[in-house]
Image (spheres, rainbow, N blue to C red):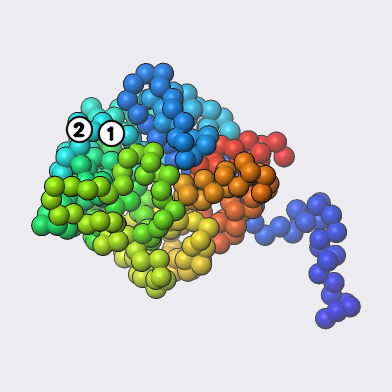
Amino acid sequence: MFPLQRNRRLRVNESIRSLVRETTLSPSDFMFPMFIAEGENYKVEIPSMPGIFRRSIDLTVEEVKELFTLGIRAVNIYVKVDESLKDNTGKEAWNPNGLMQRAIKAIKTACPEMIVMPDVALDPYSIYGHDGIIENGDIANDATNEALVKMAVSHAQAGADFVAPSDMMDGRVLRLRQGLDAAGFPNVGIMSYSAKYASAFYGPFRDALDSAPREADVVVPKDKKTYQMDYANRIEAIKEALMDVEEGADMVMVKPGIAYLDIVREVKNAVNVPVTVFHVSGEYAMIKAASERGWLDHDKIMMEQLMCIKRAGASLISTYFAKEAAILLNKK
């Protein structure tokens, strides 16, 4: 009771504040999403994501080495697939000599201790830009799961530490766990995008991979709302996460990040596995745009948002700010 209790005593200076700080950040809290393209010595900035690039495998490997020296221990990788390789089956996704498979091998050869979590979804390989196989104007859930298993096993064969299914098909975690085990990969983990919302924050990411739903000569869903979650829902996210854990997920993810911190906390309270949060492309782009105009302090906003995600319950944060934040943290 005041005046015996004065809360400001613990805020007098930074030394005291640091002693009693409840949440801390370190580079090992981050996972860096990376976009990979064909070619050699190729590096092109993504216009809607300043500072983020599509890189060829050779330059990706060099970047991964630098990330590791900064203390970052995980990368989440995506590939930009040539249009000629796209179809409605996604078969390029499990090509043992595909871009993703070659990238995994190269990263693990050059930096064996870096944890590699390749994306598992068909949208980069789909002529329709959807995360699954189109049948009769809709996403064929079970047929898509069969394709995802082939994809995940090919990632494991290439050396992936975890697979990261982002598709939101029903039952895919169980099918992936069964498929990986049957193929002799019981120690390859699954980080499931459990509560992935149908969000408008993904726009720059879809620019990076050209993976947005597109017009077609057949009937296809106009958006991803039949499989990604309705952003009005909260209880559904807990249900999805609990089901994924029951099916064998080693980690669960909430995506997007800042606008969904209530969901992060709800999921954290409900599950007994680590919770990953994806601080997504639109959230990144908004900070970059506002800071370029002088409306916000870039580094302060970046660190505040990352700290708030960690405070909400994240064990791991997948963020395009990972490298910049690690550099700042290492200076302290």
Please indicate whether residue 12 sits to the left or right of residue 136 in the image: right
Which residue is outermost to the right?
3
Cα separation, mark 1 vs mark 2, equals: 7 Å
Q: Secondary structure at mark 2?
A: helix
Above/below status of 56 relative to 299: above
Q: Which disc, if any, is residue 81? A: 1
Could you tell me if the residues under marks 1 and 2 are in contact, i.e. CB atoms within 8 Å? Answer: yes
- Residue drawn at (32%, 40%), measured in percent from left and top? 210
Name the kind of residue labelled 1 in the image.
Answer: Val
Pick out the residue farthest to the left.
136
Tag 2 residue:
85
Residue at x-position 89% and y-position 78%: 3
Q: Secondary structure at mark 1?
A: loop
Quarter placement of the N terminus: bottom right
Q: Amino acid at mark 2?
A: Leu
- Other residues around mark 2 within 10 Å, as few (<14) / some (14–19) / many (≥20): some
- Counting from the top left corner in percent of width and height, residue 14 is at 80, 52
Q: Looking at the image, how many numbered discs can be counted on the residues?
A: 2
Q: Position of residue 297 (x, y in %)?
A: 68, 46
Does residue 184 appear anywhere in the picture? no
Is residue 192 among what the camera can see?
Answer: yes
Q: Which mark is residue 132?
A: none
Camera-side residue: 238 or 206? Answer: 206
Q: Answer left or right for 272 relative to 126.
A: right
Instruction: Locate the C terminus and report the quarter of the image it occupies.
Output: top right
| Residue at x-position 44% and y-position 25% | 43
Asked if residue 172 is positioned above or below residue 8 in the image, the reply reads above
